[in-house]
Structure formats: C-alpha cells, structure tokens
Image (cartoon, helix red, strand yellow):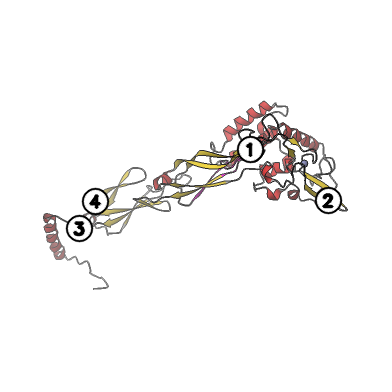
Amino acid sequence: MNREWLEKDFYKELGIASSATQDEVKKAYRKLARDLHPDKNPGDAKAEERFKAVSEAHAVLSDPEKRKEYDEARRLFASGGFGRGGFSPGGGYGQPGGFSGEFNLGDIFGGATTTAGDGGLGDILGGLFNRGGTRTSSRPRRGSDVETETTLGFREAAQGVTVPLRMTSPAACTTCHGSGAKPGTSPRVCPHCNGSGVISRNQGAFGFSEPCDDCRGTGSIIDDPCTDCRGTGIQNRTRTITVRIPPGVRDGQRIRLAGQGEAGLRGAPPGDLFVTVHVSQDKVFGCNGDDLTLVLPVSYSELVLGTTVLVPTLDGRVGVKVPPGTADGRTLRVRGRGVPKRGGGGAGDLLVTVKVAIPQKLDDNATETLRRYAEAEKESGFDPRAGWAGA
Ligand SMILES: [Zn+2]
Ligand SMILES: [Zn+2]
C-alpha cells in the first residue's frame, strides 16, 4: 500500500465533503478541470500539478467501487491498521507484520511495467487497484505520450501559429467511458485476490506473490465487457486537435503539450503530446539564433552614394540606411526587428547584408555615361587593386 496515496485527501482535492454524492463529485471535478486545464494555463506548472491531482481524485471518487475501497483503506489507515513498510497482500489489511517487509513495493505492484514513469497517478492507482498485474493493458495507468510532427513556414514558425494536427491514437472508449464494462455495469473487485491482483503464498521463510489467475492481475473483473472496446476501455480514434505553436520555434525543436497524448486507461490522466516542428526555408529570410538575416540587392551607385531602402521584416517594412561608401557584402544591423525570443523578452536583430547587382544590359545613354564615369574615376585616383597582393 502506498502511504503517500493513503495520506492524500481526494475529497479535499475536489473541495467536497466525504459525504458528497456522485453528482457532486462530478460537478466539482468538471469545474476544477475546466479552470486548471493545461490549455488554459500554458506553462503553469502549478496548475498542471493541481490538474493532475484533481484528475487523480476524480478517477477514484467517480467510481463507486474504487471510492468504497479508498474510503475503507483510509479508515483502516487512520486507525493504524497498516504497518509502516506496507501491508501484506495475502495477509489481510490488519496484519502489518508478516512478510510485508521483504517485498519491494514496486515488485508487488508491478511498478516496473508502469509506463508513467513520473510517480504520478499511473503508479499510484496501479499500486492500489491493480497490483502486480501482468496485463498492463487493463490496469489504470497514465496514457502514453504521443509523438507527432508538423512542418511550418518560416514566418509562421517565427511569429507563432495555430495549426490543426490530425492524429490517430488510442483514446478512452466513448461507450464505456474507459471503464471497459458495458454501460450500466461496472467492474467488480476480484473476490479471489480481494482486488489486489496478487495471490501470495508462504513457503518456509519466504513469501511469494504471483498474479491472480481469475482477474489476470488486474484486481477487477468485468462480467459484461463493453462490446465497442472489448473490455479494454480504449478505442483508436482519429482526432484533430488545434495546437498553438509559440513564436520563435526552431527547426527540429520538440514542443510538449501537456495532457494531449493518449488517454489514460480506466480514468487515469492522459499522456503528453510532443510535436517535432520542421521549419521550411524562406525565400527572403534566413535565421541565425534570434537574428533574422536577409540579403539586400543594391546597385554599385547605391553603395557609393548611399541610400535608404525599405526592406521586409516579420512585421511590416523598415527603412534601412545604406551609408555612402558601403562595401559590398557588408552587414547592417537593425536592432529588435529579428525573430521574437522564446518565452517573450523582445526579439533579435535584423541583419541586412548588401550584395551588389551588376546590370547585364544598359541603354546607350547609361553606357556612355558609365564610360565617362570610368575615366573620371581613374582621374580621381581610384585604383581598385591598390594594395592588392596580386598586383
Ligand atoms: Zn468501451
Ligand atoms: Zn484476482
């Protein structure tokens, strides 16, 4: 038995009295789940914690069978019925001694096969209701994390975008709401193992435990399996969820969306969704950290005489001053007009690199003027190869 679990007050978690009706349990949970939902509180670790705690409380209290067991266990716990090191699965609730000390709780309760891995609800419920199960598919456990990917345009990624993602993944069966039992019925506690999922035997000084055959280690028996999910409580469903990708996401980055993964089994909370984002190249912009880069075509005369050019940014255009005598290939910096920084806090810079464009064809007038200019340039003393190592 998990002490931590027993010390939790699920009624307090939902803000209801221990005498609350099933309807009141449902109502309290709905309201809290709405307020605390990760979608509503992005990045709020506290809300997420609470959301998990509330889901956990609901998973237990909404199921009359589980609620009864929980009430019973807590009553016994309060009256000192449990030993410190756990209880002996075969020895009854009232025997804190026995061989309980020899067991690793994780072994008894099948913790090694729990995929939740965060010590959360899956572990806890797995411990209480379906101890030692070999059938991991039917014990309450946190839903698996789901991986998916999406490709965004460069500007979408830089500015943030809301995208629909289509996913096929297991979700709680809509017919039985994940219980695995035909609507109108509910799973009952396995009488053979008293819901522990484990049968214990003593052989000499050693205690052994093995999964209960009657319930296949799940601790509960479904007399009337839901026909839509064949008693598993899960169905494959294609769903489209709308995902808000924050601004400043980089190519190859993985974004975590709490609670958007696979549904949990039998009322356990869902897993997380991880979206790997691919960012396609842009025709104009490049990216260097938080800095936005672009190459600005200019004419020779613009570099020599100086000019101001309107260049695009992620947010409208900005005038970039090219000073007289700017060298080809020079990079000009426009502060704060780059890519928005992750998690707020302004943006990087816009880096404009000038690149001279050479006309392939000029009309007679321009050609003649350029010839005259070339002579004037020579007379003025300009030598492009002055100081050049190859001269
Ligand atoms: Zn079902
Ligand atoms: Zn059993």
Start-end of magenta stretch: 253-272
Mark toward the start of the polypeptide (1 vs 3): 1
Indicate whether residue 258 is drawn in magenta. yes
The amino acid at mark 3 is Gln
Q: CA distance from mark 4 to mark 3?
A: 22 Å
Question: Circle 1 sits in a helix, a strand or a loop, which is it?
Answer: loop
Q: Which residue is mark 1?
A: 229
Circle 1 or circle 4, nearest the eye: 1
Dot 4 corresponds to which residue?
307
Q: Residue 31: x and y, percent?
A: 60, 30
The image quadrant where one finds the C terminus is bottom left
Q: Looking at mark 2, is its residue's CB closer than 8 Å to ligand 2?
A: no
Q: Residue at x 43, y 53 (%)?
A: 289
> Local crowd at mark 4 within 10 Å, few (<14), some, or many (≥20)?
some
Between the C-alphas of marks 1 and 4, the distance is: 71 Å
| Distance of label 3 from label 2 (alpha carbons) | 91 Å
x and y percent of residue 201 in the render?
84, 48
Q: Earlier in the sequence, mark 3 or mark 2?
A: 2
Q: At x 31% / y 45%, what residue is drawn?
A: 318
> Label 1 is placed on what type of residue?
Cys
- From the viewer's perspective, tell me whether residue 66 is left or right of residue 54: right
Residue 2 falls in image quadrant: top right
Going from N to C along the chain, the mark reached first, 4 or 3, is 4
**Residue 383 visible at all:** yes
Mark 1 within 8 Å of ligand 1, using the beta carbon: yes
Residue 207 bears which disc, if any? 2
User: Label 2: few (<14), some or many (≥20) within 10 Å?
Assistant: some
Q: Tell me the distance, in whole angstroms, between the alpha carbons under discs 4 and 2.
A: 88 Å
Q: Report the Cα–Cα distance between label 2 and label 1.
A: 37 Å
